[in-house]
Image (cartoon, helix red, strand yellow):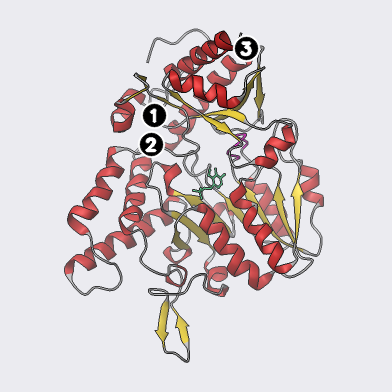
Amino acid sequence: MNAPTESRILTPAALDVARVREDFPILSLPSNGKRLVFLDTAARAQKPRQVIDAERHVYEAEYANIHRGVYDLSQRATAAYDKARTKVRKFINAASDREIVFVRNATEAVNLVAQTWGRKNLKEGDQVILSEMEHHANIVPWQMLREQTGLELVVIPITDSGELVWEAYEQAFTDRTKLVAMTHVSNALGTITPMAEIIRVAHDHGVPVLVDGCQAVPHMPVDLQALDADFYVFSAHKLYGPTGVGVLYAKAGILESMPPYQGGGDMIASVTFARTTYADIPQRFEAGTPNIAGTIALGAAIDYIESFDRQALLAHEHALLEYATERLRANNAITLYGTASDKAAVISFAIEGVHPHDVGTILDFEGIAVRAGHHCAQPVMDRFGVPATTRASFGIYNDFDDVDALMRGIARVQEIFG
Ligand SMILES: Cc1ncc(COP(=O)(O)O)c(C=O)c1O
């Protein structure tokens, strides 16, 4: 890291970013001939060697099917897979391993809840409360369920700074409200929603809550027993883990009451042509051969994150957010979208007179990877009256130099379009 300029907010010494970057092989490779400045962690985080090695180790030394083989290799694979479930449980402080279901990604987790719990419990006229800042993964499954059941979606608006309109939320409950499904952190705006309060209000009305935790778990400690969420979903790939693995948490009593999602091997107790009985939770929801190596590597990603002081990580990302916000605000041609008082390290912005895709392309020439588009949150774009934004998001391996590189890249964009 360069010596900080006066305006810089210093990262606590507890996080040695230069050392962290050595764990991520991809960050030492150039992009377009320049040093790679990776600012798209909210989409997919890069992977540390520890995660890559864990996945490779499974295929080299521990690979076999799980829960089925009697031989040593299969039993070792099963033990490693089950251990990953325990790691996830501890990571989010769930009460029991039985509450952790492995799926493909957060999207599949929401669809699973909609198509099992939702189809069983929701009928015509029932209401599901969402917010205007949901990712499509927490909108479309409910719309599909609406087609099937005739339920109604109640959308809580957001303010100009990207915060939930709290009074609208409190007043949205009726005797037909059956579920609140809401994000913990907005991927498009960075807003951290007051989830403990959201859940408390819903529970006061006897309504369960599904939390989209995709952007929360990588950045802040999440304690599900304290939060008391009924469902919580996230994807491993945003957590420095592999693609193809996601987690559905649900309270044991709720999971036990839910019909299965997909049918097939591994989710049954017994099968005859006349009748099939289902396995206990969580296996009931894990039909077919799972992503064995990926799930074990998710366990390694959790070990990796937990090898750091979580508060120091939080402080580090917050310092980057504040520094980047300050620098972007100083540029009169830039509009920021998402200025909530409580934010994760995600910044959406527009440069006057330049389409976000052009911003993204020019930054790419400079080796800077940002996301340009609607971020799978088109209603957020509609709310702010823009087709797209440019989004810079930060992770464990970013430092102030990355923010400086972004600012130089933006200056270059303005030079070209000036
Ligand atoms: C807030 C949020 N929810 C859900 C998702 C969907 O995640 P996945 O594509 O891994 O299912 C994302 C991914 O961008 C996200 O940011």
What is the crowding at mark 3: few (fewer than 14 residues within 10 Å), some, or many (at least 20)? few
Q: Which residue is mark 1?
A: 397
The x and y percentages for residue 237 are: 42, 45
Looking at the image, do the residues carrying marks 1 and 3 touch, with CB atoms under 8 Å apart?
A: no
Considering the whole magenta stretch, tell me its main secondary structure.
loop
Q: Earlier in the sequence, mark 3 or mark 2?
A: 2
Provide the residue designation for mark 2. 46
What span is in magenta?
186-191
- The answer to whether 221 appears left or right of 201 in the picture is left
SS at badge 1: loop
Q: Which residue is rendered at x = 50% and y = 58% of the image?
A: 248
Q: Residues within 10 Å of mark 1 (few under 14, many from 20)?
A: many
The foreground one among 283 and 92 is 283
- Element class at badge 3: loop
Q: Alpha carbon of mark 2 to alpha carbon of mark 1: how far?
A: 9 Å
In the rendered image, residue 126, in percent from the top left (x then y), is placed at: 76, 65
Asked whether disc 2 touches disc 1, contact meaning CB atoms under 8 Å apart, the reply is: yes
> Separation of disc 3 and disc 2 at Cα?
29 Å
Residue 333, relative to residue 315: is it above or below?
A: above
Chain-order first, disc 2 or disc 1:
2
- Residue at label 3? 331
In the image, residue 32 lies in the stretch drawn in magenta: no
The amino acid pointed to by label 2 is Gln
Residue at the (22%, 63%) spot, across then down: 76
